[in-house]
Every structure is written in structure tokens, then in C-alpha cells.
Image (spheres, helix red, strand yellow):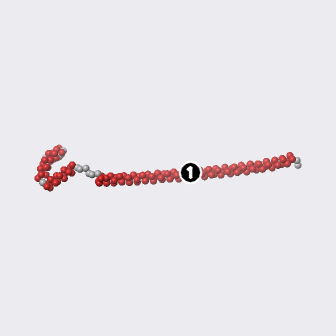
Amino acid sequence: MTLMDAISIFSLFVGIASIILAIYAMASANRSEERSKKNFENTQAMMREFYDRTKDLLNDIDKRANAIETVTSSSQEKLLSTVTAIVNETVLPKKEDAGEKFAMLFMQQLLSNPQGAKDMMNALKPFIEMSQPKEAKKKDG
């Protein structure tokens, strides 16, 4: 056996070993690609599921927010009307009504001096007749 024959045999073994390693590398790459593809599909499915859950959760939050806004708005309106009523009844003095004041004076006059009240009514009679519509005057007369 010569040196060339030894190198040729060694070269043949190295070639066979490199072919085996290349086949192993290709098989390993194929398995790695399948795992990556499977992981991608799983990740995509999880992302889709999380997206759907988040969308449902946001819809639920919107519904609850609208309900809270409605309840709060109605409570604020009730509170405002209650406070306004309290302020109107207690804090702000009621304006004097001239008709009420006149009626009170007339009642006092009627109780203390009935004849004077009658004279006052006779003095007001022309004004009362002027304030009545013409149809009412025809029915009375």
C-alpha cells in the first residue's frame, strides 16, 4: 500500500463521513424547521385567543362604563334637583307677591272694619269690570 492508496482510502472515509454529517444536518434542520413552524402556529393561535379575549373584555368594560355613566348621571341629576329645591326653599327668600300682600291687607281690613272693606270693594269694582272679558259681562248683565 502506497501513500496514495492510504490517502485515497482516508479521503473516501472522510467523504462518507461528510455525507453522513450532511444528511444528519439536513434532517436536523428539517426537524428544527418543523418545530419552528409548530411554535409559530401555536403562538399565532394564542395571540388570536388573547385578541378575542381582550376584545370581549373591552366590550364588557364599555357596557359597564355606559351603565356606570347612566347611573352616575341620573344620581347627579337627582342630587342637583334636590340641592336646587333645598336652596330655593331655604336659602333664597321668596319674592313678595303683590296680590298676596293685597289679599292679606284686605282680610285684615275685612276682619277689623267690614264696612271699610265693602267700600274698598266698591272702589275696585270698575277695575274688576274692566279686567273681565266682554262675554262674561254679557252673561252677568
Q: Give the side of residue 84 with respect to residue 34, left or right.
A: left
Which residue lies at the image location 21% right of the left edge and 51% below the top edge? 100
Q: Give the side of residue 46 with respect to residue 134, left or right.
A: right
Which residue lies at the image location 48% right of the left edge and 51% below the top edge? 59
Q: Position of residue 2 (x, y in %)?
A: 88, 47
Q: Secondary structure at mark 1?
A: helix
**On the image, which quarter does residue 126 sit in?**
top left
Which residue lies at the image location 80% right of the left edge and 49% below the top edge? 13
- Frontmost residue, 53 versus 120: 120
- Frontmost residue, 13 versus 41: 13
- Frontmost residue, 134 versus 121: 121
Q: Give the side of residue 33 with respect to residue 48, left or right.
A: right
- Residue 11 appearing in the image: yes
Residue behind mark 1: 48
Q: Give the side of residue 141 with respect to residue 15, left or right.
A: left
**On the image, which quarter does residue 75 sit in?**
bottom left
